[in-house]
Amino acid sequence: MMRSLQPHIVIDNRLEAGGEGGGSIYTKEPLAYAGDFASPEQIIPPTGVTDEDGQPIPWEACVTLNNNWGYVASDTNYKSPTIVIRKLVECVSKNGNLLLNVGPDARGRIPKQSLDILAEVGDWLALNGDSIYGCGQAELPKPDWGRYTQKGNKLYAHVFEESVGAINLAGLAGRIKRARLLADGSEVPVSRPWNAALFEADAFFNFANPVHYTYPLPDARGTVVECELK
């Protein structure tokens, strides 16, 4: 009935399943009530969500900003803006979406702590949103220093950890046409440092000169470098 009234409606898998199980959307032959996307709750699947054949399934992680779905005055255990940003990146890097819950208080107001966190996440997205919106999983292994997202020939390196020396892009030697810091558009030099002769298959970039000076990160919450691939 719902689809007959609105053919373009998007329905989650909760008609058939709950947060603890996926339902038939995970199988080769999903039922009519399987929904259009999976909705794991309070967990981000380690490798995203796929069906029995390993084919990606649309999904979103349902996560609370503190420890409760509704308002609890004593619950001030809010996730930091950095955690929210990095978990959003993690979801996108696994072809998923982040559904972030905020509970209003008894008067229907969003608590100031929540507003402050959301505002900071919004500020980060205003500068780095191109690495999130319309992006998905990159066909590359997860790097030690963070995560990748990708959109077409634009590979986004989300750097979460400071590096000793230039930042290694495993297997990308000769594949990067240019790179820039997404937040302000400034050029990021892609080079082969003097101390990287043993890593011929890898590309490297850095944020300062000389090239082994890469500390600190331009944005400790998550520095994003947009790499245009050849």
Image (cartoon, helix red, strand yellow):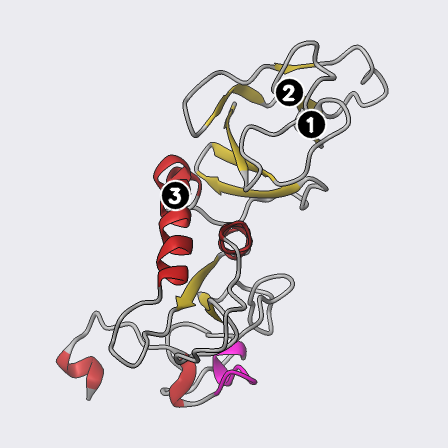
Residue depth check, mark 1 versus mark 3: number of the one nearer the observer: 3
Q: Which mark is residue 167?
A: 1
Disc 2 residue type (three-letter):
Asn
Q: Is residue 150 magenta?
A: no
Give the structural element (helix, strand or loop) at label 1: strand
Label 2: state its secondary structure: loop
> Spatial distance from mark 2 to mark 1, Cα to Cα?
6 Å
What residue type is disc 1 on? Ile
Q: Residue at x 43, y 37 (%)?
A: 152
Q: Which residue is mark 3?
A: 125
Residue 54's mark? Answer: none
128 lies left or right of 91 = left
- Is any atom of residue 134 visible in this view? no
Q: Which mark is residue 206?
A: 2
Q: Position of residue 38 (x, y in %)?
A: 46, 74
Crowding near pointer 3: few (<14 within 10 Å), some, many (20+)? some
